[in-house]
Image (cartoon, grey):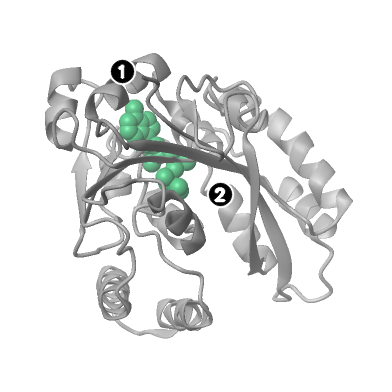
Amino acid sequence: MAGGPYDGQIYFDVRPQYPSEWYSMLSALTPRRALAWDVGTGNGQAAVGCRDRPWQRSFVMEISFVRSHCWVREDTRRFMIKCLWNNIFTLFQIAEHYDSVIATDISEGQLEHGIPHPQIRYLHTPDSLSEEELVAMVGGENSVDLVVVATAIHWFDIPKFYSVVNRVLRKPGGLIAIWGYSDIIGVNPELDALQIRYRESAMPYWRPGVKYIFEEYRNLPFPFKSVGLGEEGQPLKLSMKREMNFERFLDVMRSSSAVGAAKEKGVNLLTEEVVQEFKKAWGAPAPDMVRAVTYNVFMIAGKLKE
Ligand SMILES: C[S@@+](CC[C@H](N)C(=O)[O-])C[C@H]1O[C@@H](n2cnc3c(N)ncnc32)[C@H](O)[C@@H]1O
């Protein structure tokens, strides 16, 4: 199916982008900054490399307002929101660390909601592509300065993927950075424990590779040379702070592949009973009350071994 288990619209609406400092940190390690490849890009969450600035947060609130109050048709409204994103990104000149970014995904449904940006080219990479075709599509041998995989490697055929990475990374100097996040933590221990219980009940609907995420990449094969940002067996721990109300927290849960995969089998993982349990654990006196939350992130970056 074109969209896979993700609902591209929900994913676009709720999944986080990543701190600008990470891109500064990574780009400082690549002598050339011509081309970056974001693999399993989703809607370009890592490709845009945008900054979490106050103006951006208020802009997101305005978008939410447009979304809920604007009288125009739903598809027109979505288009307007995309154009707003596009303009704001162009105006503030973000994602400027690399001259261009190739952002690829197996899901056309995710790419349809790709965040527009003048320097990002979104490309569909179906599983049927041969290694030769994929290498050529990305830019050819020895062409990519930075490969980024943001919370997606658990989906890949990892040895096959690393073989492509070995070919496309620029020699010398190319860098691969892989990061991921799992639960939203920091609200209270009750919510943390409930998420672990929920995760287990959803196990039949996760991809087997999701174990790498749940193990926070401690067992992820990573046959690259350390650059001081984590290494095989010892990922770097990072975090991202955000604010959200309960409805948004639920939407983040709704955006997971397990919920999508279960839905395809006629199973609703987020039944009213489960939602009520989460609501109780969230514990906000008013449903709209915003809470500070943390995404725990684990990252490993490295260069080709000589
Ligand atoms: C959890 S999402 C991560 C999206 C985005 N990178 C982010 O940071 O939010 C995983 C993405 O990997 C994509 N994906 C799964 N298998 C893939 C494959 N073999 N090649 C490319 N993308 C793939 C999915 O369609 C999905 O968009």
Which amino acid is tagged 2? Answer: Arg
Question: Which quarter of the rendered picture does the C terminus lie within?
Answer: top left
Q: Residue at x 38, y 52 (%)?
A: 27
* Image quarter (top left, top right, bottom left or bottom right) of the N terminus: top left
Relative horizontal placement of residue 162, taking residue 286 as reference (left or right) = left
Mark 2: few, some, or many residues within 10 Å (few <14, many ≥20)?
some
Which residue position holds label 2?
Answer: 254
Tell me which label, 1 or 2, sits earlier in the chain.
Answer: 1
Task: Report whether 211 appears left or right of 39.
Answer: right
Question: Which mark is drawn over residue 163?
Answer: 1
Residue 158, image x, y percentages:
41, 19
Examine the rendering and report whether any part of residue 141 can be seen.
Answer: yes
Asked if the beta carbon under badge 2 is closer than 8 A to the nearest atom of ligand 1, the reply is: no
- Whether residue 270 can be seen here: no
Residue occupying the far right of the picture: 189
Q: Position of residue 54 (x, y in %)?
A: 53, 81
Compute the Cα span from label 1 to label 2: 33 Å
260 up-or-down from 225: above or below:
below
